[in-house]
Amino acid sequence: MAGLDWTYGVSTLRQWESADYEPSLPVSEKSNPLTRDIDQASAYSIVKMLQLCDSQMFQEEAGTAYQRLLSDQVVKTLMEVAKRVAVIIKDPQESCVVMSGCGTSGRLAFLISSGFNKALSQLNQSKVYSYIIAGGDRALLSSQEAPEDDPRLGVLSLKKVCEGKKRVLFIGISCGLSAPFVAGQLDFCMQHPEVYTPVLVGFNPAHQASVVQRMQELAKSQKAFLINPAVGPEAISGSSRMKGGSATKILLEVAFSAAHAATFSNTPITYNGVLEHMKAYERTLDVTYSQTDGITALVEAAGQSLRCSRHVYYLGWGSLALLGLIDASECTPTFGADYEDVRGFISGGYRELNNNDGPLTSLGPKFSIAHEDFLHLILPCLTDKDTVLLIYTHPDDATEVGNMARRVREKTPNLHAVHHQADGDTAASLQQDDIKKLCLSTLKITWPRETLASGTLQHMQRELSTKLVLNAVSTGAHVLKGKIYQNHMIDLQVTNTKLYRRATRLLQKLSACPEENCEEALLKAIYRVDMLTVEMTSSDITTHTCFARNSTKVVPLALVILLTSWSLMEAESHLKQQPIVREAVAQWMW
Ligand code: F6P
């Protein structure tokens, strides 16, 4: 284990803010100084590092160029957005709120729209929230990066969702402010201001891109809104599913909750109300990470499973199950993992998911997501090398959780639970005891007893808490498997422009070779050739990224080629002999 010092000074926590820290990179792509040694860390140290990284989300503004989550401007913009949402809720026939994003950003759009539509239904109100995800509903559960590059596709899907509406609040989410799919939609909104009010959510300062600049101009007269605080670099560079996803969830839930409270319980939208709500999410981090030992046990178990090429299964109930599905789906593009490595299942399957396109089971085995599917397809072959994680919060689910625990326990003792409970809930505690006896480890997250009004807020906090835990489990497990070098994902998929550029930059950083050589090596690894043809070198990035969909270990291969000058075949056989990618490349880098 690297010599870790938990007394990180303020300077390390804030180093990324300095103007000369990786100045050519936007915040979302910078490497976090806190996690430089994460690849050498123990499970416990990994969790501690993630805690510190997450705490950067709530750092106060410090006179640098960056707005932060709790900055004055961010709070004020959220208030304005909340007011627009309140107007829309009152006119559901003619208006709607549409959230759109790619990858995790689209998945969170789905999660948040489902939650707030449910809240409206419970009040006998019509639904107003819709979601769009690049690549359609299949992208909720699988990695579909190519559509992210297509602005026209973005516009088409937006038009379809908004058909017949006279007033639309469009919320485009792009953590890196980089997705052309979302940029196309924002551009379309600005061309049709009589119907659309665009809001951009992301975590980099506004830059020179034309769409963002025009949004900034319109924001001066509140015809558009930009919510773009910096939350610090991700623990694994560029992995915006982590802090980017968490901050997206926080910001939108705060705005929508304020709108709901204003409409249904006459609570005015105030600066302090919004600020306090944000701070409640800050406390979520404390509640969650007070369980470091429990999270560490899960990271260790999951890491061990992945290290011996076995699997991690999340079995969830209610909306927490959705966080399991989301976390699992992200492992493919983030770590170059197989869909079978980490899988999520939801009680009630597609009925509970209630996605736009309904059941997707016909699309292939990775779309089987119900607990019944787990029982039929996975349980018979389960071994004690696999890790099973039960995730639940609602006491009503405890009987079902107990039944599932017994079924799993017949096959493996490697069963764990993450559950949330209100402080002093003794009835729930009795049921928990039974489940606990069946589990190797239980992570119990205890929340203050809730009043009726705080019930929904706390549910959303429990969701965020679950997200943090699962992000730690899947990230930590892949780190322990050797998928990370320093704090970079070296085995990332190169399936869209952003990822292609990230891969080229990473190769430059790790090999210290010029950009030209790095791109050449990357192309050799994508096309699996020693000599590139003119056709290959003259094709555009889209062609390369399409081809890369079917290639594996592209970046590690390119790196070995760069570091050793070996032929493609030699480099490939080296990687085969040393499947731990970090080890395979590390030996050439000291
Ligand atoms: O390209 C894949 C990806 O990086 C996902 O991992 C991520 O969730 C998605 O793009 C969205 O990125 P952004 O929110 O920055 O547009």
Image: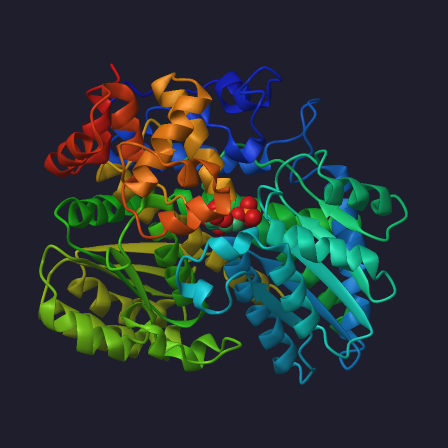
**Foreground of the two, 442 or 388:** 388
Give the quadrant of the N terminus.
top left
**Residue at the image point whose x is 51% and y is 36% from the top:** 55
429 is higher (above) or lower (below) than 504: below
Which x, y percent locates residue 565?
24, 20
Q: Classify residue 288 as left or right of residue 585.
A: right
Which x, y percent locates residue 181?
61, 54
Which x, y percent locates residue 529?
27, 37
Image quarter for residue 516?
top left
Q: Classify residue 396 as left or right of residue 150.
A: left
Q: Classify residue 81 as left or right of residue 393.
A: right
Give the quadrant of the C terminus.
top left
579 is higher (above) or lower (below) than 398: above
**Residue at the image point whose x is 79% and y is 46% from the top:** 215
Q: Residue furthest front?
A: 534
124 is higher (above) or lower (below) than 147: below
**Residue at the image point whose x is 45% and y is 39% from the top:** 500
